[in-house]
Image: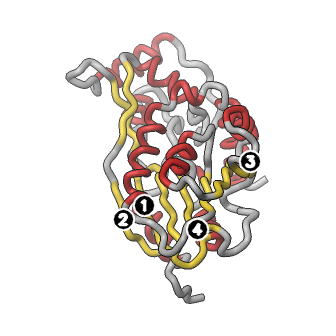
């Protein structure tokens, strides 16, 4: 099994396990969806919009925002984790959407069949060239992709604090904005808008922050090896290191290095 395939299986298992707890802990994810919706409102596709793909829909919060802005469209709700789609079906009547369990790097969609793509906090688990190439192929000429993904400074506080404990990789390294923009241009997509302001998870203590990260499924993705539980001394070291980031309002932050992009497929493609 290749390392990339092993990583994808790890992602699927992590988010399958998190399906039941995701909505209770996904405050940052909801904030990101609202920010992406604001970006999307000013970067509409050319021509009529009848079919929108939510690429990495999770439990469906983004779908609600898309449906509110585009009430007459047909929504395709795609996710890699079957348990996430199962949660989605529990809260939406049959016929409202078309659920699709598939990999963003291998979309089972006809070329040019999608008017717009919405993808909030899913593409960071993918290879930029592979995933954006698939989205570009699915988009029709004039279509737009609205993307929220994460950059390399995500959870930097946690990475810094864990460095005081051991040399293991506890936080995944994500791609920089320049890598996403270059990958988009290489597959024929044009950048029409971007926003690089970070978002923050907040909690009164480190246990609360880590509990929320675990609840949304991202806690084990990107680890280089299975870790033993931290001992008391290591936990005290971790807490003390993280305490240096406490804000004036008394809360501890976890940074999400947010990358928002609006990408358009040209009306006339040049193959």
Element under disc 4: strand
CA gap, disc 2 to disc 1?
Answer: 6 Å
| Residue 25 can be seen, yes or no | yes
- Residue at 44% across / 66% down in the picture? 44
Q: Position of residue 81 (x, y in %)?
A: 71, 42
Q: Nearer the viewer, mark 2 or mark 4?
A: 4
Q: Do the numbered discs 2 and 1 sit on residues whose CB atoms are within 8 Å?
A: yes
- Say which residue label 3 marks: 95
Q: Which residue is the extreme one toward the front? A: 72
Rounded to the nearest whole Å, what is the CA distance between mark 4 and mark 1? 16 Å
Structural distance between the alpha carbons of marks 2 and 4: 18 Å
Q: Position of residue 182 (x, y in %)?
A: 45, 71
- Mark 1 or 3, nearer chain start: 3
Residue designated by label 1: 261
Mark toward the viewer: 4 or 1: 4
Residue hosting label 2: 193
Q: Residues within 10 Å of mark 1 (few under 14, many from 20)?
A: many
**Res 14 quadrant in image:** top right
Whether residues under marks 2 and 4 lie with C-beta atoms below 8 angstroms apart, the answer is: no
Q: CA distance from mark 3 to mark 2?
A: 33 Å
- The CA distance from mark 3 to mark 4 is 19 Å
Task: Give the residue pinned by disc 4.
Answer: 115
**In this orientation, does residue 13 appear?**
no
């Amino acid at each position: 099994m290749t390392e990339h395939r092993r990583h994808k299986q790890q992602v699927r298992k992590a988010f399958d396990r998190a399906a039941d707890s995701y909505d209770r802990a996904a405050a940052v994810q909801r904030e990101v969806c609202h920010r992406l919706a604001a970006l999307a409102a000013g970067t509409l596709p050319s021509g009529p919009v009848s079919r929108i793909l939510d690429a990495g829909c999770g439990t469906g919060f983004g779908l609600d925002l898309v449906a509110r802005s585009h009430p007459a469209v047909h929504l395709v709700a795609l996710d890699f984790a079957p348990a996430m789609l199962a949660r989605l079906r529990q809260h939406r009547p049959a016929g409202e959407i078309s659920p699709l369990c598939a990999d963003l790097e291998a979309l089972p969609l006809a070329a040019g069949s999608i008017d717009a793509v919405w993808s909030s906090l899913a593409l960071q688990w993918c290879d930029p060239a592979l995933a954006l190439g698939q989205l570009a192929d699915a988009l029709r000429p004039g279509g737009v992709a609205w993307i929220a993904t994460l950059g390399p400074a995500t959870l930097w506080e946690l990475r810094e604090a864990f460095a005081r404990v051991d040399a293991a990789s506890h936080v995944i390294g994500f791609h920089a904005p320049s890598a996403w923009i270059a990958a988009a241009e290489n597959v024929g997509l044009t950048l029409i808008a971007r926003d690089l302001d970070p978002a923050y998870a907040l909690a009164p203590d480190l246990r609360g922050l880590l509990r929320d990260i675990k609840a949304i499924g991202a806690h084990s993705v990107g680890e280089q090896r299975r870790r033993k539980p931290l001992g008391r001394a290591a936990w005290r070291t971790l807490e003390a290191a993280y305490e240096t980031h406490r804000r004036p309002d008394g809360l501890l932050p976890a940074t999400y290095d947010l990358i928002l992009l609006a990408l358009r497929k040209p009306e006339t493609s040049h193959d």
